[in-house]
Image (cartoon, rainbow, N blue to C red):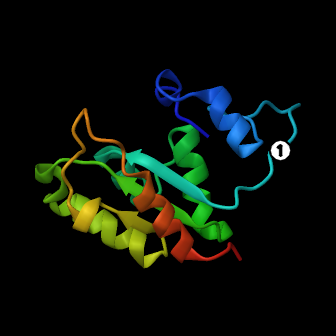
Amino acid sequence: MATPSALDFIDVPALERQTGRPVKSRYRKPHEPKPPRADAIIVAPATYNTVNKFAQGIADTYALGLLAEAPGLGIPVVVMALVNSALARRTPFRRSVEDLRAEGVQVVLGPEESPDAAGPTEPYPWHLALSALRTTGPRT
């Protein structure tokens, strides 16, 4: 799954080849078959807004709608938050991270829990999200 804005910077064909599944970015139409349930979900990069909405159960987009259901379905979720230090220090953000973790969602803030966003020349730290996913175990 990709948000509409993510479609501008991800390589959809490569992702589809790697996963063997189509990349979805919208709700299915009534005549379309239901897609298979995800084995796991990595939310990356997760913005301040996304983390807070997910924690509050706000499902006002396709991506947030899928995320809202995932913990209740037993689907492992890793949130790779990419926010700056000022936003990471905000009480609403810290509370959201605590709430998500209490539900079993793995929230990763970066190397050594550093909330600073990666610079434009630094590679995105996918290894942190993948490592966190390995520790969540299979869905139930």
Q: Which sits in the foreground, 23 or 28?
A: 23
Q: What residue does disc 1 label?
A: 34
Which residue is depicted at the point 52% across and 54% down?
A: 42
Mark 1: amino acid: Lys
Q: Is residue 23 visible?
A: no
Q: Vertically, is 116 above or below 16?
A: below
User: Number of marks in the image?
Assistant: 1
Q: Which sits in the foreground, 32 or 22?
A: 22
Query: Residue 106's quadrant in the figure?
Result: bottom left
In the image: residue 34, left or right of residue 93: right
Q: Is residue 25 visible?
A: yes
Label 1 Cα neighbours within 10 Å, binned few <14 / some 14-19 / many ≥20: few
Which residue is depicted at the point 32% across and 66% down?
A: 97
Q: Which sits in the foreground, 45 or 89?
A: 45
In the image: residue 33, left or right of residue 74: right
Residue 85: percent from left, percent from top: 13, 52
Which residue is depicted at the point 50% across and 61% down?
A: 130
Quadrant occupied by the N terminus: top right
Residue 53: percent from left, percent from top: 39, 51
Query: Residue 40's quadrant in the figure?
Result: bottom right
Query: Residue 21's quadrant in the figure?
Result: top right
In the image: residue 9, left or right of residue 109: right
Q: Which sits in the foreground, 135 or 94?
A: 135
For this orientation, the residue located farthest to the top is: 8
Quadrant occupied by the C terminus: bottom right
Check disc 1 and report its element: helix, strand or loop: loop
Residue 57: percent from left, percent from top: 47, 57
